Amino acid sequence: SLVRASAMRRTSPPGKKLSTLPRIESSTVGLDSIEAAADAEHRAAARREMPGGPAWREAAERASAGGSCELALIERGLDDADVIALVASLQREAAGSALTGSRPINNVTSLDLRGNAIGDAGAAALSGLLRGEGCAICTLRLWGNRIGDEGGAALVSALARPNSSLTSLDLGKQGQPVGDAVAAALASSLPRCACPLQTLDLRYCGMTDKGALPLAAALPRCRALRFLDVRYNAIGATGATALAVALGRADSALRVWVTSNAYNDQDAADLAALLSVDPTTAPLAEGQERLWF
């Protein structure tokens, strides 16, 4: 059975009053102090759901009986130190299970860390987790964090690990434009990717033609990839054209979303005309079944 060890979102549960937060003595305190007090409470709650906390223990015990575990810590204000601690705990559990020969109790198949404050150090720790022997994570969601070029490249490089189980990766909307660096790392990792990565979300990553071109060159060799979302970036007509042409040479099951980028309506019309001339890409110009531009 699927076990969900899920931390609550930042909204207060029914019946919970503000008075349950750490007391603020000054009656003239500003909103920043109130926010800090609320964040402290939310961070404490998040840690209770991390390995070692009651919710995790219950999920781990049930997972050890043969199920899988989905761990969600969404919008909890978690930073690099929190994620490093989380990864260390998961790795300790795996090492202990290997020594005893018992079934791993950290059977996490989905890790949802959207909307936190994870940076490069936390991303590097997660990359190490993905590279670990026996890692069972299929879905990793990191939308809305603060991962930079180094962290994004580290995560993507883990895709080339033999016997990786990752099928879905969400790196959208980081606090800085990491799209080009991530795309370059993807271009290197995806063609030799041993994992069955099927879904890749790179929306709002600031990707330009500089990143789209090498990514497009790698697409025809990505056998498992089924959905690539690069909407809301800064890809121009050159990058969009390269992605479209590459899609015509890629597996027929691949879908690519390129809308809401840095090309205009005339560029889109020119692209459609170009695609219609080449027999390998003509079907892409006739409808929006595989390419949205």
Image: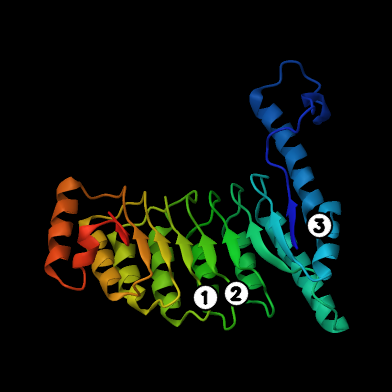
For the residue labelled by badge 2, is the local secondary structure a helix, a strand or a loop? loop
Q: Tell me the residue at 59%/50% (across/down).
A: 114
- Where residue 231 appears, as percent x and y from the top left, is 37, 52
Query: Residue 106, located in which quarter of the rendered image?
Result: bottom right
The residue lying furthest to the top in this view is 27
Is 283 drawn above or below residue 174 in the view shown?
Answer: below
Evaluate if marks 1 and 2 touch, with contact meaning CB atoms under 8 Å apart.
Answer: yes
How is the model colour-coded? Answer: rainbow
- Where residue 59 appears, as percent x and y from the top left, is 81, 59
Whichever of callouts 1 and 3 sits on the residue coming sooner in the sequence is 3
Q: Tell me the residue at 61%/68% (across/down).
A: 138
Is 192 drawn above or below residue 27 in the view shown?
Answer: below
Is 289 drawn above or below residue 36 in the view shown?
Answer: below
In this view, the mark in front (1 or 3): 1
Whichever of callouts 1 and 2 sits on the residue coming sooner in the sequence is 2
Q: Which residue is label 2 attached to?
A: 165
Q: Tell me the residue at 41%/78% (across/down).
A: 223
User: Around disc 2, counting alpha carbons within 10 Å, would you say few (fewer than 14), some (14 to 19), or many (20 or more)?
Assistant: many
User: Around disc 1, counting alpha carbons within 10 Å, would you say few (fewer than 14), some (14 to 19), or many (20 or more)?
Assistant: some
Residue 35 - label: none
- Where residue 83 appears, as percent x and y from the top left, is 68, 58
Q: Is residue 70 left or right of residue 177?
A: right
Can the viewer see residue 151 in this picture?
no
Q: Which residue is label 3 attached to?
A: 56
Q: Which amino acid does the dot numbered 3 rest on?
A: Trp
Q: Is residue 254 left or right of residue 282?
A: right
Q: Which amino acid does the dot numbered 1 rest on?
A: Pro
Q: Is residue 268 left or right of residue 142?
A: left
Residue 196 - label: 1
